[in-house]
Image (spheres, helix red, strand yellow):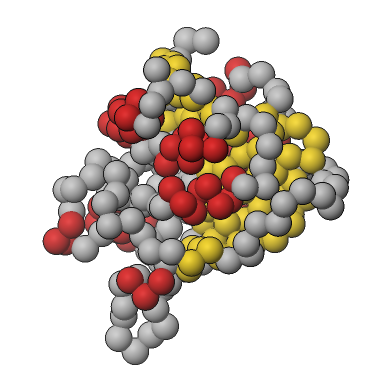
Amino acid sequence: MRFRCEKIGRATLYLGDALEILRELQPGFGGVLSDPPYSSGGASLSARTQVTSAKYQSSAHRGLYPEFVGDTRDQRSYLAWSTLWLGRARDLVQPGGICATFTDWRQLPVTTDAIQCAGWIWRGVVPWDKTERGRPQQGRYRAQAEYVVWGSNGARPLSGPVAPGVFRMPVPAQKHHIAGKPVELMTGLLSIMKGAVLDPFMGSGTVGIACAQLGLDYVGIEMSEEYFEIACRRLRAVGGA
């Protein structure tokens, strides 16, 4: 494989475009858990195509984290792109395996369409309640939740553990990514997955950290070299070779 690859403990990390790398991986994954760029953060084209720090951070916090890429698609292209990566991921997952992908309220309808267009059986939506620490807006309901759209690769037997249908926990006080999420959220989502986990949009490696804690094999892909290096450092710090 021509892409840069780092092996750290039970994790294998690739630097490059997920659509290209997914073509070259071997089937056999137990499931998918990933947090793709939502291409959200604004109703107009000019707002949506701003840099990610301008869309998702207050001015007081800008510059704390590297920008991330792939966040400027309109809804039609986001649906097409999501269907492509979800379809390629499904080809790599064992029958009955789970796909769980994050989204926000703006892209929730498109994401539920995309997971079905890609051939997964859509099973539901799991809210992540970020608690009252979410940024308030006067005269409006607080934007307090993000969502995990999940489905299975064909039939899935009614057996095994039960995972929560809602996760309530705040955004980490110390993040490694503009859109960083809690490791505990990822371990909860992984609790009903078996086998190696595929993460086509690795970011700072939070899913990989959760897999390391649970003793699961992990394959992560990241396009940004800055975030790829952050993910490598974090995984080495939790005991990877």
Q: Residue at x 46, y 52 (%)?
A: 184
Name, please, the residue furthest toward the top.
2
Question: To which quarter of the image does residue 162 belong?
Answer: bottom right
How many numbered circles are shown? 0
In the rendered view of the protein, which quadrant contains the C terminus? top left
Q: Position of residue 39 (x, y in %)?
A: 44, 52
Q: Position of residue 5 (x, y in %)?
A: 44, 16
Does residue 31 lie above or below 23 as drawn?
below
The answer to whether residue 116 is seen in the rendering is no
Q: Position of residue 79 (x, y in %)?
A: 59, 50
Does residue 125 lie above or below 138 as drawn?
above
Q: Residue at x 62, y 39 (%)?
A: 32
Image-based side of 39 in relation to 110, left or right: left
The answer to whether residue 178 is seen in the rendering is yes
Name, please, the residue furthest toward the bottom.
139
Q: Nearer the viewer, residue 157 or 33?
A: 157
Q: Nearer the viewer, residue 76 or 207?
A: 207
Q: Position of residue 196 (x, y in %)?
A: 62, 30
Q: Residue at x 68, y 37 (%)?
A: 194
Q: Residue at x 35, y 25 (%)?
A: 236
